[in-house]
Amino acid sequence: MGTIECHSSAAKKNIHHHQQQTASTMVSLLLLVFSIIQFPICSGTMNIPTKEIAPGVDMPVVSIGAGGLEMENAKTIVGNWLSLGGKGIDTALHYYNQAEIKAAIEESGLSRKDLFLTTKIPNCQVENLAADVQTDLDLLGTDYLDLLLIHGPRKGDCALAWKEMEQVYERNQARSIGVSNFKREHLESILSNATIVPHVNQIQLNILQNNPDTIEFSTKHGIMVEAYSPLGRANHSGDISGNVVIQEIAKRHKVTTYQIAIKWILQHNWILTFQSSSKEHQAVDADVFDFTLTYTEMQQLDWLSGLGELNLNSARDDETSNLALAFAVSASLGLMIGIVIIWQRSGKYHRVNADDHTISDLQMNRMEKLDRHKTKVSSQF
Ligand SMILES: NC(=O)c1ccc[n+]([C@@H]2O[C@H](COP(=O)([O-])OP(=O)(O)OC[C@H]3O[C@@H](n4cnc5c(N)ncnc54)[C@H](OP(=O)(O)O)[C@@H]3O)[C@@H](O)[C@H]2O)c1
């Protein structure tokens, strides 16, 4: 999974140079491998897995965010992502950069069906909702969205707004619908009157900052949790790269702290949108599909923000079954050893009792020595 081929410009020069000189294939190959390892400036094809968030709607588990700190660079950010093979794009009407996203998509040459577009209408103002959706569609140059969210439970009646969202879904303007920044009480208010349970709740969520109650409530109602600011938003939402526990786990797996931040979310079975204007960061951050955090590591990370108290069912992975297996094997071995000891002892007891001696370890040792001596002496004849 996650095949990302990284080539530096130095590597490309090396290849060209060696081709011209018709140097041996072996040398070229070694230099190429060395360059790839040393200078990873990436291009290639990522293969991000998907999760079904609504009937028949598979969403990439990692999308690129076009909001955040670097939102004015939307065209570069999205262009880089698409050139790496990314498909999921997260935007919002209030990011005011739809035109750049549209341009990046056009330049990529990808067809609409190969993309997964998420956007957000600003709030719960019912009177503006339908028009906002149409504006978003027009600006993005598409006639449907893959996921439409209410950006926040602000202004207006969110229960009524949700009924309007259901209409957008029925009109096939959005393949899935959801909310963002909704806490338990906001979700409760819309669920009481909903025909469609929100497919997604996009919330601020990273190892160091999250809201366990919102996560628990969303999960309980079958609402997919999508993390935003998963990397701590350049220290505005927790210092991921500076945390020693995260650093230690990253070192163990030979990956970066940012990769650990992303992997932790995915192993919890959540999805996420992250941002980087750097193509290299994008490629490395999303390259998380060839290692697995252990149950203990997941727990250590959960505890960093108090999430551990909920005992959330993360990928309680193979390690749990491995532990159970190890326990079962140890217990069986222990039982067998116990039986053998009892059996041996009962034999000795029997022997000693037959001789009508009182038992003590010392006496048994002496008797055993005597037995051995007798056997030795008798075998000499
Ligand atoms: N629904 C909402 O209300 C809401 C709110 C906030 C955000 N969002 C969405 O979520 C997306 C992501 O969240 P976010 O932008 O707030 O934060 P984020 O993804 O947690 O962090 C982005 C920051 O991390 C840095 N970064 C990424 N990889 C790095 C690496 N390998 N090494 C060093 N620095 C690295 C980026 O800098 P570089 O560019 O230098 O790599 C950028 O400054 C947004 O773009 C937006 O689409 C939604």
Image (spheres, grey):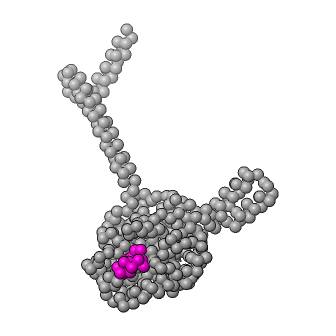
Q: Residue 102 appears at what percent x and percent y?
A: 55, 80
Position of 66 compared to 329: left or right?
right
Q: Quadrant of residue 294?
A: bottom left
In-front residue for pair 309/225: 225
Q: Residue 181 appears at what percent x and percent y?
A: 38, 80
Please check the rendered image and state whether residue 292 is part of the magenta-colored stretch, yes or no: no
Position of 242 compared to 324: left or right?
right
Q: Which residues are magenta?
A: 165-178
Q: Quadrant of residue 225?
A: bottom left
Extreme residue toward the left, this view: 356
Q: Residue at x 58, y 64 (%)?
A: 45
Q: Residue 301 appears at what percent x and percent y?
A: 41, 65
Q: Residue at x 29, y 76 (%)?
A: 195
**Could one spot residue 333 in this view of the protein?**
yes
In what quadrant of the picture does the C terminus appear? Answer: top left
Q: Quadrant of residue 107?
A: bottom right
Q: Is residue 24 above or below residue 183?
A: above
In-front residue for pair 127/267: 127
Position of 291 compared to 185: left or right?
right
Please check the rendered image and state whether residue 171 is part of the magenta-colored stretch, yes or no: yes
